[in-house]
Amino acid sequence: MPEFLEIDGRVLHVAFRAGQGRPVVFSNSLGTDLRIWDGVVAALPEGTPVLRMDKRGHGLSEGTADTIEAFAGDAAAVMGRYGISGAVVCGVSIGGLVAQGLALARPDLVSALLLSTTGLRIGTPRSWQDRMEAVRAGGLDAVADGMMERWFSPAFRRAQPAVVAGYRTMLARQSPGGYLAACAALRDADFTEAAPRIGQPALCLAGETDIATPPETLRALADALPRGRYREIAGVGHLPCIEAPEAVSAALTELGAGG
């Protein structure tokens, strides 16, 4: 059931499911809300504890944040409210950077990482500046069609046009201010130097057709992490949690979720 927590003077939207065993904590991609994990949660072993949240400026959460550290701090605070530690933390895209930040700042909270279609950094400062300028000029609707091409594989877009249209609406309805602030966080984030200090087991999950964080980006991330492993899902784009939720759920179970 959705809940609302006040964290440092702002209200965050969360969804917590109590259960037994090692919990899973999810961190969303840019321009989405916690519903992107619905299929993954449904495929997890029954009774697995689950925590999802809308990051600042997304979904039903207030405020903005322009650093990965701020998003990771929110995640730590929410986990503290529910007494969660030693979790399998699963992040996609910017959520994967947040997961890395959380593992560094609060290793007691993170037992393992599923880093989905993310990287040591994502894009370039210039690419994020260009994105921010496009959104400032035309709003999120102006970039939404291009984002669908980045989010989903060609095969998925052909087979599931109604689903793609629904996620386009999700993106277009996000807060422009929250989106722009998160773009600034992505522009400035780089875990290249910090990665050797992330000691938790980490499975780095690539989508074969992902053009936002292509497989070579995930291979580089796995190579940089002391306990990193690489895995690729065939025929999938930037959001495996939507295109292949069972594969994501299986990877989480492999990392100890619910155990």
Image: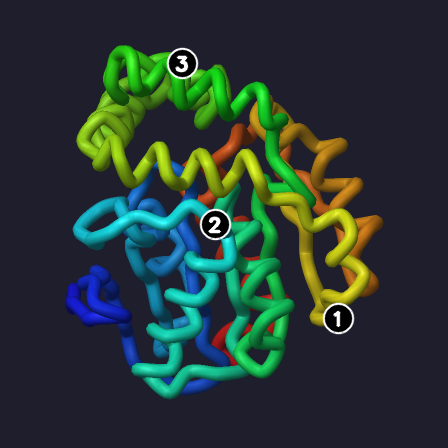
Q: Describe the element under mark 3 as helix, strand or loop.
A: helix
Q: Residue at x 54, y 59 (%)?
A: 99
145 left or right of 235?
left
Mark 3 burial class by Cα count in 10 Å: few <14, some 14-19, many 20+: few
On residue 241, the disc is: none
For marks 3 and 2, give the CA distance. 25 Å
On residue 146, the disc is: 3
Image location of residue 5, percent across then percent down: 20, 71
Image location of residue 152, percent across then percent down: 45, 25
Q: Residue at x 21, y 63 (%)?
A: 10
User: Do labels 2 and 1 touch, CB within 8 Å?
Assistant: no
State the residue position of label 1. Answer: 199
Q: Describe the element under mark 1 as helix, strand or loop.
A: loop
State the residue position of label 2. Answer: 67
**Amino acid at the residue labelled 1:** Gly
Pick the front one: 95 or 129: 129
Which quarter of the image is occupied by the N terminus? bottom left
The answer to whether 131 is drawn above or below residue 13 in the figure is: above
Q: Describe the element under mark 2 as helix, strand or loop.
A: loop
Q: Residue at x 57, y 47 (%)?
A: 116
Residue 159, picture quadrant = top left
Pick the front one: 199 or 38: 199
For marks 2 and 1, give the CA distance. 22 Å
Sequence-wise, the earlier of marks 3 and 2 is: 2
Sequence-wise, the earlier of marks 2 and 1 is: 2
